[in-house]
Image (cartoon, helix red, strand yellow):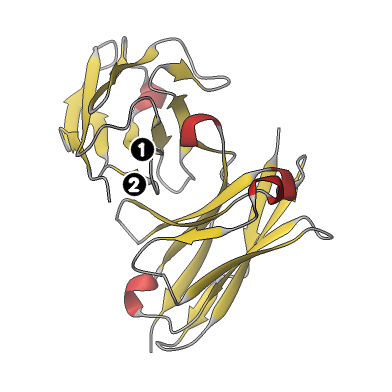
Amino acid sequence: DIQMTQSPSSVSASVGDRVTITCRASQDVTNWFAWYQQKPGKAPKLLIYGVSFLASGVPSRFSGSGSGTDFTLTISSLQPEDFAIYYCQQGKTLPTFGQGTKVDIK
Amino acid sequence: EGQLVESGGGLVKPGGSIRVSCAASGLTINNVWMSWVRQAPGKGLEWVGRLISKIDGGTTDYAAPVKGRFTISRDDSRNMMYLQMNNLKTEDTAVYYCTIVTTLGALDSWGQGTLVTVSS
């Protein structure tokens, strides 16, 4: 299995801050890579697919970058509705997820 | 855009069985790849298995912890997917979500989930 490791596991930030979350894959996943947002009591929501493509309806303050084994999710200006847990996922082989990064209020 | 609704969760004893369902609307399930993902209470996301579209072979794949115990199937006439879970263990306690596999393996159109609790 391809292991996905996110960092940090949690981050405290304020509205308007720039937030960056990283994800490292144990093997090259090329561009078979996605990010998800999950709010308490809700199903996960696809944010970004193919490393950098925003899913439908996702605000442009979210962006993704990277290739191969190292990937980054950036929120350019954190909004109140962005406080959530974020997961990365590879789809190159049988899917695996990162352990999640909680973004909470500073 | 497709919509998925899970049902059938509940309380089951260790060693028991349960079948959860995923009803699809706005899409035809035999034309798409679909996955089950679970989330234990307070934990992260874990991929469970997938059902490949009929045109791509219609086969299934499973994660190691559930292989041999869980079976994914599809009823095209009802546009539904199922997850049959046998020989359940306490560690199978989770919310089970069905999703559509889209571009480059991303998972979209998540249902609201159904809770399966395995406890004596």
Q: Residue furthest right?
A: B77
**Residue in the picture at 38% in, 83% down:** B119
Q: Is residue B88 above or below residue A79?
A: below
Q: Are marks 1 and 2 on the same chain?
A: yes
- Label 2: chain? A
Amino acid at dot 1: Gln
Task: State the mark number for residue A90.
Answer: 1
Q: Answer left or right for A87 relative to B106.
A: left
Can you say whether A43 is above or below B96 in the image? above
Pointer 1 with pointer 2, Cβ within 8 A:
yes
* Count of marks placed on residues: 2
Relative side of B49 to B45, left or right: right
Mark 1 vs mark 2, CA separation in Å: 6 Å
Helix or strand or loop: what does disc 2 sit on?
Answer: strand
Q: Chain of mark 1?
A: A
Eyeballing the image, is A52 above or below B99? above
Q: Is residue A8 above or below residue B78?
A: above
In the image, is A36 to the left or to the right of A56?
Answer: left
Tell me which numbered mark, 1 or 2, is placed earlier along the sequence. Answer: 1
- According to the picture, the residue beneath numbered tag 2 turns out to be A96
Label 1 element class = strand
Task: Report x, y in % for residue B65.
Answer: 34, 68
